[in-house]
Amino acid sequence: MLALYTAGTGMQAMSTQVNVIANNLANVSTTGFKKERVMFQDLFYEQVRQPGTLNTLGQVNPTGVQIGLGTQVAATEDDFRPGDALNTGNPTDLNIQGNGFFQVKIYPDIGGGIGYTRAGNFTVNAQGNLVQGGPDGFLLDPPITVPQNYTGITITPDGVVNVTTPGNANPQNIGQIQLANFTNPEGLVKIGGTIYVQSTASGSPTVSDPGSGGAGRLQPGYLEQSNVDAVTELTNLISAQRDFELNGRVIDASNQMLQTINNLRQ
């Protein structure tokens, strides 16, 4: 019976939904994380009788008999709405107020060596380079190097990096942070670490200073939190679990019907 296969596709789709929800909830506290949502679509239809065919009286049938064969996952899309801004007080922590991604230098064999992220948890490493916090310590691109003897650092909303050094009353401009924008950010490829790389679907980035070219301005001393709403995800989880169970009941019912038919043949 078709119902067995059809309900099976529903269970498989709900299993994917639960996997996505689990990943969202696991990253509820991940800086710069963007939650995913699953998009579904129905499968092909068995055309027992198409609408518009002629019946035995030579009249046009206004309706037909079309039996659906289930559902499938059409896509998983990131929700790029901004998360809440967390006040950290760290001058090298940056929150993007609006569109755009920070650019970091990643492994050269991945995405052309440039990654894109909303996580602005930057710090100064031992070589004086401004790098993304974390085990990999990816360098900000374009690179910004801080003098070894600096005593203070400030970053303006438009991305200008200034430092103060001993003996100099006036801050010194040492670089400009830039942001990248994409026509289709949903087409970016995720590689983990809240880092994306470009693809044919995303298109090439448009790079500009913060506050220009469609890019948002920076908010120093703040970090963008995950935009996952735990309550919403738990609600979606309950719904997915119920849908999975309902499809399982369809399989049980179909199996019982098949057993009944088999008994009639004996």
Image (cartoon, rainbow, N blue to C red):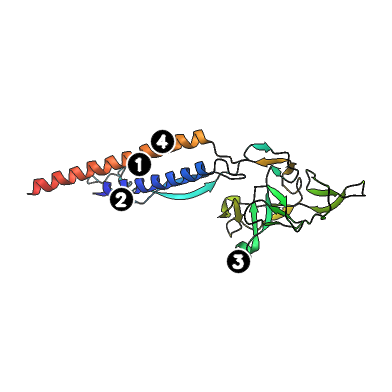
How much space separates mark 1 and mark 3, taking CA atoms?
40 Å
**Residue for badge 1:** 244
Residue 209 percent location from the top left of the image: 77, 50
How much space separates mark 2 and mark 4, taking CA atoms?
34 Å
Q: Is residue 190 above or below residue 156?
A: below
The reply to whether dot 3 and dot 4 touch (C-beta < 8 Å) is no
Callout 3, which amino acid? Asp
Q: What residue appears at the point 27 percent right and 41 percent down from the top-left corner?
A: 250
How much space separates mark 1 and mark 4, taking CA atoms?
10 Å
**Residue for badge 3:** 109
Callout 4, which amino acid? Ile
User: Can see residue 19?
Assistant: yes
Callout 2, which amino acid? Gln
Q: Tell me which corner region of the image, top left, top right, bottom left or bottom right, holds residue 157.
A: top right
67 or 159: nearer the viewer: 159
Residue 194 percent location from the top left of the image: 59, 50
Q: What residue appears at the point 43 percent right and 38 percent down from the top-left corner?
A: 237
Residue 134 percent location from the top left of the image: 63, 52
139 or 3: nearer the viewer: 139
Chain-order first, disc 1 or disc 3:
3
Mark whose residue sits in front, 2 or 4: 4
**Residue for badge 4:** 238
The reply to whether dot 3 and dot 2 touch (C-beta < 8 Å) is no
Residue found at the far bottom of this picture: 109
Q: Secondary structure at mark 2?
A: strand
Q: Residues within 10 Å of mark 4 (few under 14, many from 20)?
A: few
Q: What residue appears at the point 18 percent right and 43 percent down from the top-left corner?
A: 257
